[in-house]
Image (cartoon, rainbow, N blue to C red):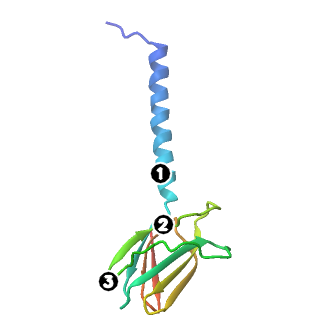
Amino acid sequence: MLATFHFANAVKAASLALAVALGATTAAHADEYERWIEIQNYGSNEIIDIRITDIGEDSWGYNLLFEDYIGAGEDMYVEPLDYVNGDCLFDVLIEYADGSEVTLWEVDLCSATSLAVDEWDYEISYM
């Protein structure tokens, strides 16, 4: 028996293949710009305040921990609340319960995966 070519079926198959390819590309693109970061507290005090803002902003914005904290030896994932310019670079302010602060400038949150911090220093891990 000879197979019959159906143009309509070929168009449907091509459309499905294109939709799958575009979906995969869109998902990969979205993951590329995730702005979550894991904050790892290696300090001896609780982290009581984390503020992340677009570079060049005049204010730090909201405390991303709200009324929560990150205890010594603990970690938590955070994400900036209101990023308006759509970029990947952010300034980060972390405050400890003892009043010490760590400020990081122009952190690339699209490629950074974790931030290990104590009251005096920090280390950023990237993908």
Q: Position of residue 39 (x, y in %)?
A: 41, 76
**If the image is split into quadrants, where does the N terminus sit?**
top left
Give the side of residue 55 with respect to residue 107, left or right. Answer: right
Badge number at residue 79: 2
Q: Which residue is mark 1?
A: 28
Q: Nearer the viewer, residue 3 or 88?
A: 88
Q: Quadrant of residue 69?
A: bottom left
Amino acid bearing label 1: Ala
Amino acid bearing label 2: Glu
Q: Position of residue 2 (x, y in %)?
A: 35, 8
Q: Position of residue 42 (x, y in %)?
A: 37, 86
Q: Which residue is mark 3?
A: 73
Badge number at residue 4: none
Q: Secondary structure at mark 2?
A: loop
Kindly report the distance in space between the C-alpha atoms of the residues bearing marks 3 and 2.
Answer: 20 Å
Q: Residue furthest top?
A: 1
Identified at 67% across, 73% down, the residue is: 57
Q: Position of residue 59 (x, y in %)?
A: 64, 76
Identified at 47% across, 39% down, the residue is: 21
Between circles 1 and 2, the one closer to the viewer is 2
Q: Nearer the viewer, residue 69 or 119?
A: 69
Q: Secondary structure at mark 1?
A: helix
Q: Is residue 91 above or below residue 88?
A: below
Pointers 1 and 2 in contact (CB under 8 A)?
A: no
